Image (cartoon, grey):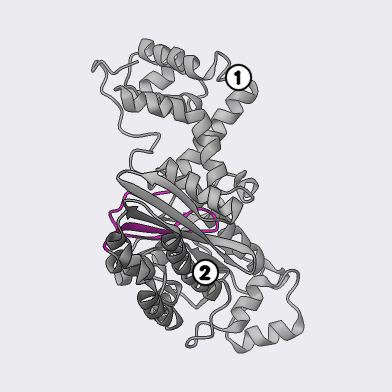
Amino acid sequence: MSAESLAPLRRAPDLYDDQFARVLSGAGAAELVDAVVDGYDCVTAALVVDGADCEVARAPFVAALDPRRDRWVLDAVTQGRRTGRPVVLPHGQGHAVFHPATVSCRCVGGLLVLVRGGVDDGTVAAVGRFAGLFALIAARDLALLQPGGTVDLPVVGDLLTHHGAVDAPLRARAERAGIDLSAAWIVGVVGPTSRADLRRIRAVLGAGRGVDFVSVLDGVAVVLSRGGDAAAAAADVRAEIRRVVGADVLVCAAAVDDVEAGGLVRGYEAAAGAERVLRSSGRRRGAVDVASLPAYLPLLRALSSSELAEFVHSLLGPLREFDRATSSDLVRTLAVFFEENMNTAATARRLGLHPNTVVKRQHRIAEFLGDEWADGAAGVSLRLALSIDALAVDQPGRDVVGAAVPYGSSPAP
């Protein structure tokens, strides 16, 4: 790469100082990646990921950088997170540089940029400086924000983190804040979006209707609403953010009716855990009642998005690659086959296929996964992989129960 093409990144201190001031004033990750792409001609795209290897923001918005769909992105992010060192790899006509971001020795994600041509140590160092700005953003948002208005009160965060029965001092503080501990409550967790930072989300929900209290805890916006319909509450929060901000988000909500016995912290942990697992599985939007999710979901909380993706890909990847190369639909056929209790005739009726076509697809599945794919431990693993895959319902082309192929149309086996 010529010295002239490297010059923009060598001018990084000017833009860095400007962005540092903006971050201190409340700018978020979306503004950071926009500034990096707009400020340097040699940078074509930028992506910020969090500590779970999930997208936080990218620029331009149409950039094909997705750790869930682009394997090379996930590999670079995973390597950087595990080693704690920057990763440089060839990509297209240039290079990709990923620099991890840490807060108190904890990896909170990192910054990936695409650069035309080659890179040198100065380029990597410049990317590292901007990754440091994201670490500052993450450190700011990981802690409870200062109270802003009447809805974001310290007592809300204390109730959400207090294990066991609510003691007398905390009960008195809650009562002064207007929190009825004998009432039924809903705890909702709003997943991050590249279109607005947490302060913006908090302000929108605090000014809206239907939400009694809003706080920021562990890097997510948390809402408390009176009532017992978690699905409706999640849908209302999602709709309000979409109406005001113009961004679609993932909202997970849990109904709580034992607040005095520590129900709020259990509801918060359930909703936050569900949001993390769903986001790790690839889901970015929707309104979800935690009670409607599979019972095994808590078991997945300790897994990163890369580990979930690897498990699903190891089983469904060969089938999906075959589907892309042909007009077949092995993954959907497999899902419906299990849903119909492994009844071939019922599967054929559900899909609008001739039974012989379903049998041929089963033989094709056996070629990829082995003859015992439906039995014993192999069958359990496949069902689990399909279930995890179905959690990411917002991804195009990932529905397992889409429109049936009309009978008599000659779909590929």
Q: Quadrant of residue 331?
A: top left
Residue at 31 percent of width and 51 percent of height = 117
Residue 103 located left or right of residue 344? right
Q: Earlier in the sequence, mark 1 or mark 2?
A: 2
Res 173 visible: yes
Residue at 40 percent of width and 51 percent of height = 96
Marks 1/2: CA distance?
Answer: 47 Å
Which of pointers 1 and 2 indicates the residue nearer the eye? Answer: 2
Residue at 64 percent of width and 83 percent of height = 174
The magenta stretch is 41-67
- Given residues 102 and 124, the one toward you in this image is 124
Q: Residue furthest top?
A: 356
Res 195 visible: no
**SS class, disc 2:** helix
Q: Is residue 57 magenta?
A: yes
- Given residues 230 and 141, the one toward you in this image is 141
**SS class, disc 1:** loop
Residue identifier under label 2: 135
Label 1 amino acid?
Answer: Asp
Image quarter of the C terminus: top left
Label 2 amino acid?
Answer: Ala
Crowd around label 1: few <14 · some 14–19 · many ≥20 (10 Å) = few
Q: Position of residue 202 (x, y in %)?
A: 44, 76
Crowd around label 2: few <14 · some 14–19 · many ≥20 (10 Å) = many
Q: Position of residue 137 (x, y in %)?
A: 49, 72
Q: Which mark is residue 375?
A: 1
Q: Position of residue 314 (x, y in %)?
A: 52, 31
User: Vertical placement of 300 versus 249: above or below?
Assistant: above
Q: Is residue 225 magenta?
A: no
Q: Position of residue 64 (x, y in %)?
A: 32, 49
Q: Quadrant of residue 244?
A: bottom left
